[in-house]
Amino acid sequence: MDSEFHCENCGAALPRRFAHSRMIACLNCGSTSVLKDEAFRLAGSGGVMQDAPSLVTLGVEIRAGAHHVTPVGHARFDYGRGWWDEYWCLQGRGDSTGCWLSVDEGDYALEWPVAEDRWPRARNLSLGQGVTLGDRKFTVTEAENAKCIAVRGEFPEELAVGETHLYYDLSAPGAALATYEVWDGGRGWTSGFWIDPWDVGAV
């Protein structure tokens, strides 16, 4: 895809697939660049992404349940006992709607960012706590600190390698889930659902 932006470290083209990209990790040299004032500025390293067997490949459309998504960004988080992968995906062709595809030890989930005006009031969560998000009642089932260890591709927000994120996982009937995430200088909510691994594959 044509690009008007180039990596300030190696000069490789940085593709902008949609208007909301705020960070790109160069696939050529691994440097990260962040969009500021309509220009990409070198921000640091994308870390080392160790390849592992996966059904998910950047730039290749896949079927995830009833949805077709194209992963354009890949982040890996280490939580001490292991790691999981988060893929920023675009839906459909030419659609700027994005979602997160999580892959953790063979479990798959799709989640969409929740608009800030729909966030629950609760800021400090605890295990077993009930939280209402939209018209659903969720229960906090897990709280985990995780460190971002590698990034590659495009993202709607800045992710810093080495930064620690606190994740709260919440569950509701019907395979529904939500995530509340807190990091240095920010927080956010996503919601979606678990996907049967047999429903993930090539289009």
Image (cartoon, rainbow, N blue to C red):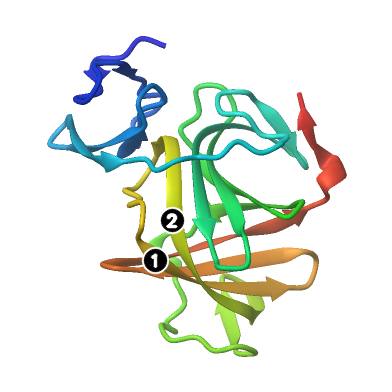
Identified at 56% across, 68% down, the residue is: 80
Q: Position of residue 93 (x, y in %)?
A: 56, 22
Picture residue at 70% right of the left edge, 30% below the top: 62
Image coordinates of residue 178 in percent, x first then y, are: 60, 67
Q: Is residue 143 left or right of residue 118?
A: right
User: Which residue in the protein does label 1 denote?
Assistant: 164
Secondary element at image label 1:
strand
Q: Quadrant of residue 173?
A: bottom right
Residue, x 50% and y 29% (percent of image)? 95
Q: Is 77 left, or right, of 184 in this rendering?
A: right
- Numbered tag placed on residue 61 in the rendering: none
| Quarter of the C terminus within the rendering | top right
Residue at the extreme top of the image, as rendered: 2
Name the secondary structure under disc 2: strand
Q: Is residue 41 above or below residue 184?
A: above
Q: Is residue 1 above or below residue 47?
A: above
- The tag earlier along the polypeptide, 1 or 2, is 2
Q: Residue at x 50, y 40 (%)?
A: 49
Using the image, determine if residue 47 lies above or below residue 13: below
Residue under numbered circle 2: 148
Measured as percent of width and height from the top left, residue 89 is found at 54, 37
Q: Quadrant of the N terminus?
A: top left
Category of crowding for the residue at label 2, using alpha-carbon neighbours closer than 10 angstroms: few (below 14), some (14–19), many (at least 20): many
Asked if the residue under mark 2 is in contact with the one under mark 1, i.e. CB atoms within 8 Å, the reply is yes
